Image: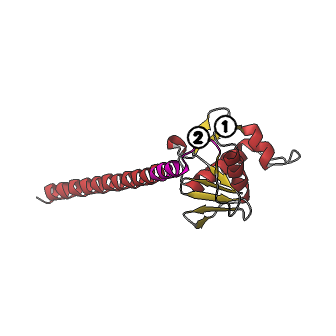
Amino acid sequence: MIFRFGLFELDTESEQLLKEGRTVRIQQQPYKLLCLLITQAGRVVTREEIRAALWPAETFVDYDQGVNFAMKQVREALGDDADHAVYVQTVPKRGYRFIAPVDAGARGASKLVQLNSPEPDLNLQKVLWSNIAELRLADEARNQRRQTAKVAMLWGGIALAIGAIAALLLR
């Protein structure tokens, strides 16, 4: 199966995540978690369901830390942010919900099925989600530039203050 969402494509046969045709590196546990979320798109997947899907019953690990770490890696692979989610929404004390529209189809199939939309207009939704992702990336870049400018202004102010103090002391 191939699942398409936003700028991404998840190929379950080759076990690859692609972004605009390029492979995105993702480890096995986060990959399994992403598959679980996508196949349950629009529905809350509980932390217990995630634990059961990622680790056999006889495995002894800190499941909460493991789920948190796997989710962090999923978000990093997707470029998603928990506070401004485009793909994966956190449902506090319950689990996670994949919120982006997902198209599903067999490899080479011309027809795709919309997993979590009552009225599928696949092209429109893909364009909208692509634009949302691009806008969020542009917003993050703008915020980074602003932060850099603030730091530069702070250092400039410090240098100016040191220069003024030095000038006063040298008189």
Q: Is residue 130 magenta?
A: yes
Q: Residue furthest front?
A: 110
Q: Which mark is residue 43?
A: 1
**From the viewer's perspective, is residue 161 above or below residue 65?**
below
Span colored in magenta? 115-131
**From the viewer's perspective, is residue 37 above or below residue 170?**
above
Residue type beneath disc 2: Gln
Work out which quarter of the rendered image holds the N terminus and state it: bottom right
Q: Who is closer to the viewer here, 105 or 128?
A: 105
Tell me the residue at 55%/49% (across/down).
122
- Which numbered disc flags the more N-terminal residue, 1 or 2? 1
Q: Residue furthest right?
A: 58
Tell me the residue at 24%/53% (across/down).
157
Residue type beneath disc 1: Arg
Q: Residue furthest bottom?
A: 22
Query: Percent from the top left, x then y, of residue 38?
Result: 67, 48
Q: Who is closer to the viewer here, 5 or 117?
A: 117
Res 18 → quadrant = bottom right
Q: Which residue is mark 2?
A: 89
Q: Is residue 107 magenta?
A: no
Q: Secondary structure at mark 1?
A: loop
Query: Percent from the top left, x then y, of residue 59?
Result: 85, 48
Q: Residues within 10 Å of mark 2 (few under 14, many from 20)?
A: many
Of labels 1 and 2, the one closer to you: 1
Query: Percent from the top left, x then y, of residue 136?
Result: 44, 50
Tell me the residue at 27%/54% (across/down).
153
